[in-house]
Image: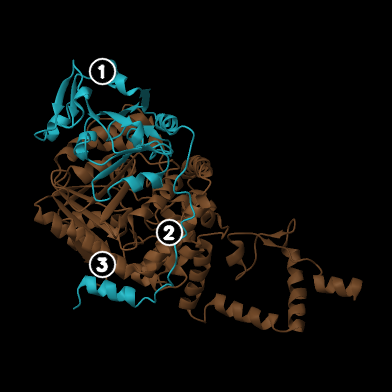
């Protein structure tokens, strides 16, 4: 008996091939808007996330302010975030050596950077590279504070995908965890972080 | 092999009977109307934001057609890419074979419980039931799937399987089955109840099962689009991840995702972007599952591919926009369709995957439509659903043979239309039916006309035909 693989391939080849098609790429691959950072801030806030735009120099102070306001005293952080982000007065738990899942479950939150942000859709993309860490770091804690640099902001989805390395583990985040499963009403807060706070540094 | 395809549910009556029963449930109709009205308005808003929406639809259609035209090539590419990145690829001809592959993989890990991400493919093949029979408990983690599972219910929508339930009903279902009662019937409290209920399972279960929204042939990247974070939990925390994917879910290149990541969220949940999208390629040491298995599922897809008109149903990206605009779906709900694929897309996909138009229930599905065309207008990959519906109706008639009452009536009509004298005599005879009419309408005809008037009125035939009038006035 032929293997399932051979049989499925044979069925496809015997199905009468549809004619080849050319893909029209006349949709907008890049879009320009007057203020991409402003648009990102507006669209992220639309998802009920908390957004602040700060100057690069004021960033550490703002991180400290966000954590103090939330009362977050123990924070997970990828080991390779810029040292200035690890402000005083907070117990930082760098993920090196890798933290246990049970530890991630009891900390107050996580601080990460990102790879790319998409203004038009209010999306932050993490690719597990510098300042982002393993995927579970930004998933298990209930509070995610994410730093976006202005040069990481693009306007459209196509521009974002062009900047990403497809084979890295990628997570696209658009607002806090949410569901529309009850009467198609979007409510925030199911299994992922229920609070997403974004600091855009320009 | 050769077992019945579980894509349609055994024992469900044909659509007209099932619809009749559904229509008698006023609560169901209220729930559906509220939900579909909400989502229709939202979708129109986010679609209008993109000037290039129609061009994106055309691109989406063409990319999927290219996949279908070169499916063998792209599947082999995908297999190669996934293996190169440390994954294992399995092929399954039908539901039974896919279920056996998954059960064996779970047993290999010594697990008796798995967590699941919402997946149409695994619902289509009845995986949960097959696992249960093999001694493995499958825990659904998507909120709506959990509602269906805990309520011993069946899904009624592709995206929101519990759309037929309102908040009060959901609170009752949760209250009866969860250790901790939901605080109220506010969606926020119900979501909180689901979070507490599943938290331990996410943090301790060793095997997860998912579907896939897309897989990129060239890079081996698999995409899961979701909202709640249950998907991320399943895709990153367990040691072993098993993904079951229909063979048509491919896109050729990474760049192609730029089209679908715009089309899908706006069409399905009517958002600019869904809260979470996860993309992974094989195994990444130190981040996520150490074992990744991809099961490529046929289960009627290659047979559908062989139908020149019907194959466009394989472009479907499971957004469910067609359900939300369908006047028939809005009134009957999804369960009347007797398949995990309800609504307009279900009416063309389920019978084709089932592959047996002699089955009365499957054969009734292409008639579950008024052919208004709203589904075609919203479809992000431009599936001409009305075209496929009429095509399948013709196949259903063909399958019935030439001696049915319908076939005989059509043959008689053809004989009458073939000759002007016969036609005019028939018109005169028809005009007599006006004596049965009230206010220009006939609501009850004797058999076989009753087959028509059981479901709708028949307009009274005028006293005089146009031909007769013309002869009298201008002739």
The residue nearer to you, when weighing A56 against B345, is A56
The residue to which callout 1 is attached is A64
Chain of the residue under label 3 = B
The residue to which callout 3 is attached is B76
Alpha carbon of mark 3 to alpha carbon of mark 1: how far?
Answer: 51 Å
Residue A29, percent from left and from top? 44, 49
The residue nearer to you, when weighing B409 against B373, is B373
In the rendered image, residues at marks 2 and 1 fall on the same chain: no
| Tags 2 and 1 touching, CB below 8 Å | no
The residue nearer to you, when weighing A137 against B337, is A137
What crowding class fits label 2: few (fewer than 14 Cα within 10 Å), some (14-19), or many (20 or more)?
Answer: many
Numbered disc 1: secondary structure: helix
Residue B23, percent from left and from top? 50, 50
Direction from residue B100 to residue B325 in the image, left or right:
right
- Seen in the picture, residue B467 relative to A58 is either above or below; the reply is below
For marks 3 and 2, give the one nearer the viewer: 3
First along the sequence among labels 3 and 2: 3
The residue to which callout 2 is attached is B346
In the rendered image, residues at marks 3 and 1 fall on the same chain: no
């Amino acid at each position: 008996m032929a293997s399932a693989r051979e049989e499925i391939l044979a069925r496809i080849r015997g199905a009468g091939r549809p004619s080849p098609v050319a893909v029209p790429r006349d949709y907008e691959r890049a879009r320009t808007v007057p203020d991409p950072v402003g648009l990102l801030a507006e669209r992220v806030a639309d998802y009920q996330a908390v957004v602040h735009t700060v100057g690069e120099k004021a960033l550490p102070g703002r991180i400290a302010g966000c954590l103090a306001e939330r009362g977050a005293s123990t924070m997970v952080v990828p080991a390779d975030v810029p040292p200035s982000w690890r402000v005083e007065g907070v117990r930082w738990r760098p993920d090196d050596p890798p933290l246990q899942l049970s530890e991630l479950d009891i900390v107050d939150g996580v601080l990460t950077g990102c790879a790319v942000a998409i203004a038009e859709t209010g999306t932050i993309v993490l690719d597990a590279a510098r300042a982002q860490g393993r995927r579970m770091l930004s998933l298990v804690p209930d509070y995610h504070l994410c730093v976006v640099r202005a040069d990481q902001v693009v306007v459209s989805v196509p521009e974002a995908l062009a900047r990403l390395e497809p084979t890295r583990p990628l997570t696209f985040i658009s607002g806090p965890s949410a569901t529309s499963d009850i009467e198609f009403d979007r409510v925030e807060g199911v299994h992922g972080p229920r609070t997403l706070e974004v600091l855009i540094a320009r | 092999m050769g077992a019945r395809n579980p894509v349609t549910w055994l024992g469900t009556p044909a659509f007209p009977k099932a619809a009749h029963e559904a229509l008698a449930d006023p609560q169901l109709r209220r729930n559906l109307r509220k939900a579909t009205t909400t989502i229709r308005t939202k979708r129109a808003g986010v679609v209008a934001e993109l000037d290039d929406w129609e061009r994106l639809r055309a691109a989406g259609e063409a990319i999927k057609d290219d996949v279908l035209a070169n499916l063998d090539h792209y599947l082999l590419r995908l297999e190669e890419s996934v293996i190169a990145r440390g994954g294992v690829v399995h092929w399954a001809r039908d539901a039974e074979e896919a279920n056996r592959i998954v059960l064996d993989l779970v047993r290999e890990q010594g697990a008796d419980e798995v967590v699941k991400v919402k997946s149409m493919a695994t619902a289509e093949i009845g995986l949960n039931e097959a696992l249960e029979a093999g001694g493995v408990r499958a825990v659904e983690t998507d909120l709506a799937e959990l509602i269906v599972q805990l309520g011993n219910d069946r899904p009624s929508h592709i995206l929101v399987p519990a759309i037929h339930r309102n908040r009060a009903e959901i609170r009752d279902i949760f209250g009866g089955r969860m250790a901790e009662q939901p605080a109220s019937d506010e969606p926020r409290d119900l979501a909180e109840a689901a979070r507490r209920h599943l938290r331990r399972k996410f943090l301790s279960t060793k095997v997860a099962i998912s579907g896939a929204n897309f897989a990129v042939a060239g890079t081996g990247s698999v995409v899961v689009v979701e909202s709640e974070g249950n998907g991320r939990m399943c895709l990153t925390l367990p040691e072993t991840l098993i993904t079951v994917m229909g063979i048509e879910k491919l896109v050729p290149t990474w760049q192609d995702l730029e089209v679908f990541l715009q089309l899908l969220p706006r069409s399905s949940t009517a958002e600019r972007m869904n809260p979470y999208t996860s993309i992974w390629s094989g195994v990444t040491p130190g981040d996520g599952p150490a074992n990744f298995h991809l099961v490529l599922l046929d289960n009627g897809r290659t047979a559908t591919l062989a139908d020149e008109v019907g194959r466009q149903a394989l472009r479907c990206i499971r957004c469910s926009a067609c359900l939300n605009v369908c006047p028939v779906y809005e009134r009957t709900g999804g369960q009347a369709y007797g398949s995990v694929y309800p609504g307009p897309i279900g009416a063309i996909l389920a019978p084709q995957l089932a592959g047996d138009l002699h089955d009365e229930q499957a054969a009734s599905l292409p008639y579950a439509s008024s052919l208004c065309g709203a589904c075609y207008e919203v479809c992000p990959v431009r599936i001409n659903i009305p075209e496929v519906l009429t095509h399948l109706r013709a196949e259903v008639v063909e399958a019935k043979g030439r001696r049915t009452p319908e076939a005989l009536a059509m043959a008689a009509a053809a004989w009458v239309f073939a000759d002007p004298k016969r036609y005019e005599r028939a018109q005169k005879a028809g005009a007599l039916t006006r004596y049965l009419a009230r206010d220009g309408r006939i609501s009850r005809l004797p058999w076989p006309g009753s087959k028509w008037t059981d479901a709708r009125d028949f307009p009274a035939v005028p006293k005089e035909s146009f031909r007769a009038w013309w002869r009298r006035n201008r002739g």
